[in-house]
Amino acid sequence: ASNITSQGVNLISIYAYSIQVTWSGGTSPVGTFKLQGSNDPGDNGSGQGVSQPTNWTDISDSPEAISGTPGSILYDIVAVSYRWARLVYTAGSGSATITSAYMNPKGV
């Protein structure tokens, strides 16, 4: 079992998004998924690109515990006011394979 943290996704001009995660078998996985957000600007100061945020905060009511069997979760976030989002998995015990993790953003 290992912890996983996705790269941040820049949400500029995004008003809603969903994230679906599915996992398979393994040996009785136990852990927690959650979303984190950041308002860091992400501009490295040169105007030549975007860097990942430094400061992340857990999004209220997003932790979802998993245990024992294959499954999936779906987050549906409306009225986004933070600039960045990412998905975090904290392993407890056992193992599983994350078979997919997709984000569907909706812009203005």
Image (tube, rainbow, N blue to C red):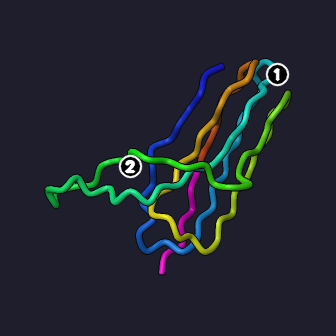
Q: Is the residue 56 above or below the residue 17 in the image?
A: above
Q: Is the residue 5 above or below the residue 9 in the image?
A: above
* Quadrant position of residue 24: top right
Disc 2 is placed on an element classified as: loop
Q: Amino acid at mark 2?
A: Pro
* Quadrant position of residue 88: top right
State how far apart marks 2 and 1 are (Cα): 33 Å
The secondary structure making up most of the magenta span is: strand
- Look at the image and say whether residue 91 sits in the magenta stretch: no
From the viewer's perspective, is the residue at label 2 or at label 1 nearer?
2
Q: Amino acid at mark 1?
A: Ser
Q: Which residue is mark 1?
A: 28
Query: Between disc 2 and disc 1, whose residue precedes?
Result: 1
What is the magenta range?
102-108
Q: Residue 28 location, x and y as percent? A: 82, 22
Q: Is the residue 91 above or below the residue 65 in the image?
A: above
Q: Residue at x 78, y 27 (%)?
A: 30
Q: Which residue is mark 2?
A: 53
Q: Residue at x 57, y 62 (%)?
A: 104
